[in-house]
Amino acid sequence: MNIANWLYQTALSWPSRPALYEGDSLRQTYHALLQATCNRATWLQSVHGIRKGDRIAIFAKNAPEYIEALHACWWLGAVVVPVNCKLHPREAEWIVRDAGAALTLTESGTVFAEQPDIREAALGAPVPGPHKITPPARVEDRDLAWLFYTSGTTGTPKGVMLSHDNLRHMTLCYALDVDAARAEDHMLYAAPMSHGAGLYMFAQIRAGGAHLVPASHGFDSDEIIALAKTRGNLVFFAAPTMVKRLIATAKQQGYDGTGIRTIIYGGGPMYAHDIDEALACFGPRFVQIYGQGETPMTISVLPRDLVADQSHPRWQARRASVGIAQGAVTLAVLGTDGEPLPAGHTGEICVQGPTVMTGYWQNPTASAAALTGGWLHTGDLGHLDEDGFLYLTDRSKDVIISGGTNIYPREVEEALLAHPAVFEIAVIGEPEPDWGEQVVAYVVFEPGKSASVSELDSWCRQQIAAFKRPKRYAVVRELPKNSYGKVLKTVLRARTGHEPTPA
């Protein structure tokens, strides 16, 4: 089944329901969204020659046209490649080329103007119409729908292949375990639609509820509070750092969360103090999820009643967990022998189920490594308690999570090592109160050479996305290493007081 069928059926069933707001302004009813989607699908096909199976990249901030563009691709049986809008154009270019994108939709339509072989168009470009309203193309359940690029320990991006069936089961998990979608709700897109926030749109479409893109097209605490007061029934996904910033603003304004129905948090460590403070300010409006691109948003869930519970003898420990297995998956903690470990024993978190990716795009070696023995091996370490609650122990891939966004040390290290004055480099994350973690670079200069912090920072800006660059540099004579010459990042983390305890 084509996942776009849900929009088609909802628009035919409730054509006059509000579908899309930009701020407080109604942009489209469901009938208007359906018509615009068919218009854009026809434009993609007739002007750009898009056909079934083609990949279309979207490299843009949140925008009202985003949902329309996604569905226009699926209407033709094409595949969407959502690219993190924070990436440097050079990094986005790598993804576009690796995916073999037939077309890239960007905000301006000119991001890749100097790359004439990359076909590009503006996301919000007006398209002719009205064209005939037709149902979406027929596809098989395992046909590719969403090609999401993530990275592993090497920093090399990998395209996670998610099928229409993966997305359907992910959405069923949302409705069963996370939050019951309702027609009267407004799903707010303050977090990037290229990631989890965008994936959560399907349940709202199926329920015939409204979608709300903030006027800022991003996260702004004051704006969210204002929209909660005017529109009401807000439901949205937020990284823990976003939750913390929202609560800080709410406390300044004396705001108690009225108008917000559900905040789904995940994507990074939520500290116990922060969720306790959020509950004290807003009450039981929070749901925690744990997932990764390879099984999108669907490993475990801590429902709102368990987040807020104080009646169970171990309620504090449970609140510090990432919850229980979501309804469509089997969850296990495996030892080095590939066998499930008893409760309380730490091992690798592994998942089975219909939400698990079909593999990595054109990367059979990485696919085989991740999908071994019938399990998705997440690379995260944790343990289960006797009641099936999962606790994250560590992230074995050294990923730095800042503001809910993954930053891979290897990418930063490679950029800095290209500087002529840098001899050795080691990049780690250290706790940071507003963003969860920040990037720290330990630098060893070439003998007789040096560079200022501003010079290194400028160099990084030319090589990688600005959000990935180090926020602190530590110049050292040498890096700690073991007898094999491997840099001991555990020693560097000990210097920063790293190892945050997720809650």
Image (tube, rainbow, N blue to C red):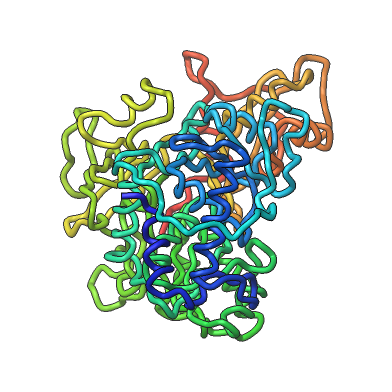
Q: Name the image quarter holding the C terminus.
A: bottom left
Considering every residue shown, the one lying at the far front of the view is 132
Question: How many numbered circles are shown?
Answer: 0
Q: Residue at x 54, y 28 (%)?
A: 100
Could you tell me residue 158's position as x and y percent?
Answer: 47, 31
Q: Tell me if residue 442 can be seen.
A: yes
Identity of the residue drawn at 69% across and 38% down: 88
What is the x, y in percent for residue 383? Answer: 27, 47
Where residue 5 sits, quadrant-wise, is bottom left
Q: Is residue 437 left or right of residue 346?
A: right
As displayed, is residue 95 above or below residue 168?
above
Q: Is residue 222 above or below residue 412?
A: below
Give x and y (percent) for residue 69: 56, 52
Q: Nearer the viewer, residue 2 or 350?
A: 2
On screen, residue 318 versus residue 130, left or right, reads left
In the displayed structure image, the side of residue 449 where residue 353 appears, left or right: left
Residue 358 at what x, y percent from top left?
A: 32, 35
Residue at left 65%, top 53%? 127
Along the line of sight, which residue is nearer the eye, 438 or 351? 351
Residue 429 shows in this picture: no
Between residue 220 and residue 246, name the one nearer to us. 220
